[in-house]
Image: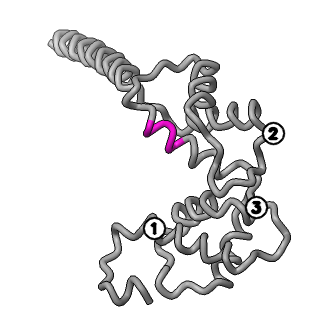
Amino acid sequence: MITDKLKINAGAVSKLLTLFCNVSYLCRLISDFFMLLNDTEINAIAGTILRDHSFLFPSTYPDIPLNLAMLRDALAKADIVTEKNDIPDIMQRVELSLAAIVPLTWNNYGSIAILLNQQYPDENLLSISEQRVIELTRGLSNFADNSLPDEDVIDSIMYTWISFTDEDMSLSEDESWS
């Protein structure tokens, strides 16, 4: 009688294992179908772009100089085929990854604002001081500029950073202009 129960339990375990393997396989298929790139893949794509286009960094532009041709080339090198409608999301994630690894200077206020917004989402932007923005910027691991920033640059960082959170903030007209 005990051996009969063991046979049933062994059969149930076998069925469960088969089901689990099918579910795991199905999950991999779904992931591949929807082309969900993980952070490791995004970082690898960003690294490829940085290696292939190192002459562009540090950039003299406020934002990361990333274009569709650069992204397509890096995706091809990684053997990643993606749907056209996935490109904007991938582009945004790669740009954020690049912003975190390329050497930044005060000229890169757009990229600095992106990183500050990501790393300090709870910072009170209505009362933040210029000195605090300078401290946070210099604290970014890839910030590589020892010069003193112009006041206009700090204002640009602050305004750009605020623009990322502007949708979430409920300000009266008077508050938004003060």
Q: Is residue 47 left or right of residue 76?
A: right
The disc, 2 or 3, on the residue closer to the chain's N-terminal end is 2
Examine the rendered structure and indicate whether residue 153 appears above or below residue 151: above
Identify the secondary structure beneath mark 2: helix
Examine the rendered structure and indicate whether residue 170 appears above or below residue 127: above
User: Which span of residues is magenta-colored?
Assistant: 88-93
The amino acid at mark 2 is Phe
Provide residue 31's location: percent of width, then percent of height.
Answer: 38, 25
Residue bearing mark 1: 163
Q: Residue at x 21, y 16 (%)?
A: 12
Provide residue 73's location: percent of width, then percent of height.
Answer: 62, 23
Mark 1 vs mark 3, CA separation in Å: 20 Å
The residue nearer to you, when weighing 25 against 58, is: 58
Examine the rendered structure and indicate whether residue 103 appears above or below residue 53: below
Q: Which mark is residue 105?
A: 3
The residue nearer to you, when weighing 69 against 91, is: 69
Mark 2 vs mark 3, CA separation in Å: 15 Å
Q: Is residue 36 left or right of residue 137?
A: left
The disc, 1 or 2, on the residue closer to the chain's N-terminal end is 2
Provide residue 148's location: percent of width, then percent of height.
Answer: 81, 76
Mark 1 vs mark 2, CA separation in Å: 30 Å
Query: Magenta span: helix, strand or loop, mainly?
Result: helix
> On the image, which quarter does residue 52 sit in?
top right
Identify the secondary structure beneath mark 1: helix
The amino acid at mark 3 is Thr
Residue bearing mark 2: 55
Asked if the residues shown at circle 2 and circle 3 are in contact, with their CB atoms under 8 angstroms apart, the answer is: no
Q: Is residue 131 left or right of residue 57?
A: left
Q: Residue at x 76, y 75 (%)?
A: 149
Q: Residue at x 45, y 67 (%)?
A: 163
> On the image, which quarter does residue 19 sit in?
top left
